[in-house]
Amino acid sequence: MDAGNAGQLRLPRPEPTDLQVPERHPKRSPILLLLQASIGVVQDTLIWLLVSWLNSQMYLGLHIDGFLTALLAGTVVRVAVLALLPFGPRPATSTP
């Protein structure tokens, strides 16, 4: 034994086969996407209702008649954003 390594414990290195990543269930991804999309639409709906309430407090012209109108507006906004997302700015690539 080397005098410099007298107090150190050596652990075996794990083999690459020991570090396996568990496979995902193939049917979970669409469910998660639908859940995230529906949460986004509800979020947009609540924002439309908040903007309508703020405008009524400040006596401005925007008014949303009800929840279904706000839901339709939230759906239109979410679909438009998702449709225009591929045309947005791309991250810059660095060249060495």
Image (tube, rainbow, N blue to C red):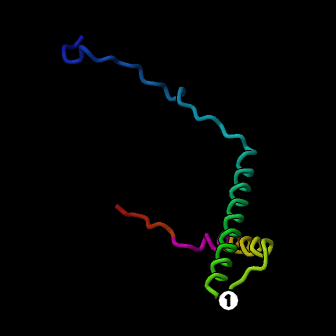
- Viewed as shown, does residue 47 lie left or right of 10? right
- Observer-nearest residue: 17 or 36? 36
Residue located at (41% from left, 20% from top):
12
Q: Position of residue 71 (x, y in %)?
A: 76, 70
Q: Quadrant of residue 60?
A: bottom right
**Outermost residue toward the left in this view:** 3
> Does the magenta run of residues contain 3?
no
Main secondary structure found in the magenta portion:
helix
- Observer-nearest residue: 86 or 73? 73
Q: Position of residue 16 (x, y in %)?
A: 50, 29
Residue located at (61% from left, 84% from top):
58
Q: Quadrant of the C terminus?
A: bottom left
Q: Which residue is mark 1?
A: 61
Q: Secondary structure at mark 1?
A: loop
**Outermost residue toward the front in this view:** 57
Q: Position of residue 23 (x, y in %)?
A: 65, 37
- Observer-nearest residue: 86 or 64? 64
Residue located at (64% from left, 87% from top):
59
Q: Quadrant of residue 10?
A: top left
- Observer-nearest residue: 34 or 42? 42
Highlighted range, magenta: 81-89
**Outermost residue toward the top in this view:** 1
Tell me the kind of residue under disc 1: Gly
